[in-house]
Image (spheres, rainbow, N blue to C red):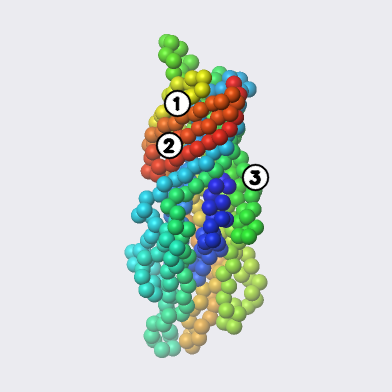
Amino acid sequence: MLGMLSVFAMNQSANAQFGDAGEILRAGAQDAELMLTEYMRPAAEGFSTSLNTGWFNTAGTHSTLGFDLTFRANVSAMPSSLNTFNLNELSLEKSRPINSPIASTIIGPKNTTAVGIYGDNPFTGQEEEIARFNIPEGINFGYVPSAMAQLSVGLIKNTDLSIRYMPPVTVSQFDLTANLFGIGIKHDIKQWIPGMSLIPIDISVAAGITTFNANAQVDVRPDATTPGAMPMSQWDDQEITLRATGTNFNVIAGRTLPFVSVYAGLGYETSSTTLKATGNYPVESIGALGQREIERITDPVDIGFDGSNSFRGLAGARLKFFLFTLSADVVVADVTVGSLGFGISFR
């Protein structure tokens, strides 16, 4: 999934998506989970959906031991309604916006939003602002990309087995590591339908599942002079992890000619994403005598996102020049995903 990593790594605000997002955890477990859910929602939904795209570039299958190796880039077009979220619509317990309640999501405008953390001073009986933090800016890009390499091999009975794989890749400047694995299958069902051999089209069923994992080190530390902040080593194990899974089932039909193949189909897709913050995080609070002190929260966030779970329509085409192929397709479901691929194909 180097495509997604490249958007984060090449964009100046990439650190906001991972390292700076940890700043939200200063709000405490309950409020942080609510804000992180909305901040990360477009990436979680768009990315897990893009994992379901690009599994095939024809409706037909390979001959036995035939194969294709394709490098593919996918882009999920996210609705503009996911560019921002309203803090006042969340059931926040201790946090409130300082000025505007409208905050950017991960794909939204390059605007940070200041949030205050409030608590009651037991010594004075008055509510006080304890601390402030910024919800990170977005990358100002309303699309969620992904990219992958896929190998498909023809087995017996007009059946293809497909493998997607990316070994752990590290973007060292952001302490970010990611990997991917997927497996899929496509089977020609036309061979089992009497009389269908006379019709010059291919009809297949296909299914696939892909899982993507990423983790990033974050560094959220308190003021060393605040009681409870020391030793600083207690904040060394902070990490944000993301795991996205996409599964799809399809029926596709198409025609393959010497230089061009076209296909269309219907299917059903499901996707899900989990986001976790593990380690110890500092939360500033007010002590019994009105003094500031640091509370430690451990593993404060475990968020589950349900992505696209819907029927889908798809269509695509492939051009072939000797062994080389150029393909494109579009999937229309809850989120629309476009895909472009380049590769080689034999038999």
Q: Mark 1 and mark 3: span between their CA atoms? A: 32 Å
Q: Is residue 99 left or right of residue 28?
A: left
In the rendering, at what x and y percent does residue 276 appear?
53, 57
Give the crowd class for mark 3: few <14, some 14-19, many >=20 residues within 10 Å.
few
In the rendering, at what x and y percent does residue 168 appear?
64, 48
- Which numbered tag is attached to residue 330? 2
Q: Mark 3 and mark 2: span between their CA atoms? A: 27 Å
For the residues bearing labels 3 and 2, Cβ distance under 8 angstroms: no
Q: Is residue 135 above or below residue 261?
A: below
Q: Amino acid at mark 2?
A: Val
Q: Is residue 44 above or below residue 322?
A: below
Residue at 42% in and 69% down: 113
Q: Residue furthest front?
A: 321
In the rendering, at what x and y percent does residue 286 appear?
48, 81
Indicate the secondary structure of the residue bearing disc 2. Answer: strand
Q: Amino acid at mark 3?
A: Pro
Upstream in the sequence, badge 1 or badge 2?
A: 1
Mark 3 lies on residue: 167
Q: Is residue 73 visible?
A: yes
Residue at 43% in and 75% down: 116
- Which numbered tag is attached to residue 262? 1
Upstream in the sequence, badge 1 or badge 3?
A: 3
Of residues 188 and 84, the one nearer the viewer is 84
Q: Amino acid at mark 1?
A: Val
Indicate the secondary structure of the residue bearing disc 3. Answer: strand
Give the crowd class for mark 1: few <14, some 14-19, many >=20 residues within 10 Å.
many
Upstream in the sequence, badge 3 or badge 2?
A: 3
Indicate the secondary structure of the residue bearing disc 1. Answer: strand
